[in-house]
Image (cartoon, rainbow, N blue to C red):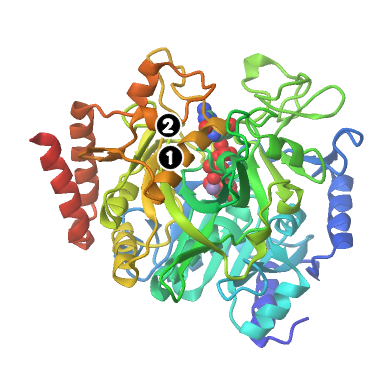
Amino acid sequence: MTTLSALQSWVDQVAAQTQPDAIHWCTGSNSEYQQMIDKMLADGTLTTLNPEKYPNCYLHRSDPSDVARVEHLTFVCTSEQDDAGPNNHWMAPAAGHQRIDELFDACMQGRTMYVIPYCMGPIDSPYSRCGVEITDSPYVVVNMKLMTRMGNDALQRIEKDGVFVKGQHSTGDLDPERRLIMHFPDELSIKSIGSGYGGNALLGKKCHALRIASFQARQEGWLAEHMLIAGLESPDGEIHYVACAFPSACGKTNLAMLIPPDSLPGWKVWTVGDDIAWLHLDETGQLRAINPESGYFGVVPGTNELTNKNANDMITHDAIFTNVAVTDDNSPWWEGKQDGAPATDWQGRAFDAANGKAAHPNSRFTVSAKNNAGYSTLADAPEGVPISAIVFGGRRKELAPLVYEAKSWEHGVLIGAGVASETTAANIGEVGVVRRDPMAMKPFCGYNFADYWSHWLSFSERSDKLPKVFHVNWFRQNSSGEFLWPGFGENLRVMQWIIERCEGRVGANETPVGYLPDPADIDTTDLDVSAENLAALTSIDKGQWQEEMRSVGEYLESFGERLPEVLRRQQQSIQAELDS
Ligand code: GTP
Ligand code: SPV
Ligand code: MN
């Protein structure tokens, strides 16, 4: 079914191993999508949602044990353990293959094997990279159709390029004891079994576009990052593009689709991407970004008309919902939805608050980017968009101010390396525990973080036009657990300050940890935040920061001799300044 013998022989080999009843090469057509949907409606994998209110929307209820990524079962298999680093679970490649291949043996008997050629990035972009996912899950096929450029066009490019990332996936028996996600960066290959969930199963996304791509990006001089890309259009029509790295379920989709508050007339926000950015220096030294994806796999809870109108609108048609609740008129329902009430919970049981939330906290929507009213016209541009600012962020009740700016690129890399955030339901495991999540890439960097930071640092040798670097925190709380900052659309006020800093139009207060805004420089027109809260949001607590910088120092040292000296010196000088 392909002229590329490397692809045909790999497909043959996987078929021989997994023994499917049939093999289907995906074309990416709309009729193929509908065929897959119909098949899943027939076997109960999907149900139809209210066709008047939610046309072409479907609900998938996953196995209750299969609702999130599984970092503890995710491995990077490099020949040397040090190359994967302390930030990854590691297995030697031969051992990794052996362990997972046992699970793949004959696992597709009675099933159809789907071959999905896909292109991450605009089909005609030099920055794009292709892959082929083999899967026995029609749910994966339809999600890949919504999320990537998939099918015949991608296959043509693969046949032309001659290179592709191999992704082998099966849902297996969904037993968490037989679930593994393995990456073989040297072979450009991924093997994943035992899960049908997004990041574990849609191999173009986290497995390819972050773990494998970050590994390739280091060798080739670019960056693959867990970042949204948004264009912020000011009333004079100028658009500044920003790339923002926040950990999973910490606000990327929401910021990428932001609707400005009424008190900031004339502003518009355009979505280029909501989860992943591939960043390259162009020949002038300008950093440019493409979004390798063409759809969204977003957190449902909290989405509504007020928090994220664009997302709320785009999921009213042609969307797949996973693990949400359902109302008695068969509409999807989730915590934070403004209307209706749950009749059935995410597991299909009659809703009972004693069982916990109605929708799973990590319930997700899948939609094509075409559904987004704010989709940027440049999202398909092969050359990507120029980046004015890089913004790191985390979910922190305490410590981190609303916004601060790095004093240099090197300082910015330290800020990124020191990002910490409360864990969320996007991964199976404890929620709400603060952990280091450098550049929001803790679960996604395909190699040793120490080498990754060296790679980041090397960009200042290659360009004198790098974007400014910032850190934001929308999640500060008071002692009663209330947010100090309203967040969502109001975050534009902070992004405005960031743009003004990039343009050199506004001053800032210098502190040892970075430049902070003067509260008077944040536009607070019609904003309901007390002067006291704003002061707390725009200042640092010296004692807490002394402790934080010590902890960042200890964390960095845990990477041993690979830690770049420049980063160590950055940390030490800030520590010394705080201690003086
Ligand atoms: P992934 O898809 O997991 O990578 O997550 P993401 O970074 O795109 O997170 P998303 O925008 O989906 O937000 C996750 C949760 O945080 C949702 O429940 C949002 O409603 C909530 N959230 C987003 N932005 C804000 C904010 O500014 N303030 C507050 N309080 N909550 C927010
Ligand atoms: C995340 O967990 O960061 C996500 C969802 O964006 S998943 O694609 O499952 O990784
Ligand atoms: Mn993500």
Q: Dot 2: within a 10 Å radius of its alpha carbon, few (fewer than 14), some, or many (20 or more) residues? A: some
Quadrant position of residue 147: bottom right
- Residue 69 visible in the snapshot: no
Image position, residue 343 (x, y; %) = 79, 20
Q: Is residue 340 left or right of residue 178?
A: right
Image position, residue 297 (x, y; %) = 65, 47
Determine which of the numbered discs, if any, sits on residue 497 in the image. Answer: 1
Image position, residue 464 (x, y; %) = 33, 66
> Disc 2 on helix, strand or loop?
loop
Amino acid type, callout 2: Ile
Q: Nearer the viewer, residue 268 or 327?
A: 268
Quadrant position of residue 85: bottom left
Instruction: Determine whether 424 is above or below 174 in the image.
Output: above
Determine which of the numbered discs, if any, sits on residue 92 in the image. Answer: none
Q: Does the residue labelled 2 lie within 8 Å of ligand 1?
A: no
Which quadrant, please, contains the N terminus? bottom right
The furthest residue to the front:
236
Q: Dot 1: within a 10 Å radius of its alpha carbon, few (fewer than 14), some, or many (20 or more) residues? A: many
Image position, residue 529 (x, y; %) = 46, 19
Q: Name which residue lies at 50% across and 67% down.
A: 97
> Are the two marked residues, 2 and 1, in contact with CB atoms closer than 8 angstroms?
yes
Amino acid type, callout 1: Trp
> Disc 1 on helix, strand or loop?
helix
Residue at which label 2 appears? 522
Q: Which of 262 and 354 is in front in this view?
A: 262
Q: Is residue 463 left or right of residue 528?
A: left
Q: Quadrant of ligand 1?
A: top right
The furthest residue to the right:
52
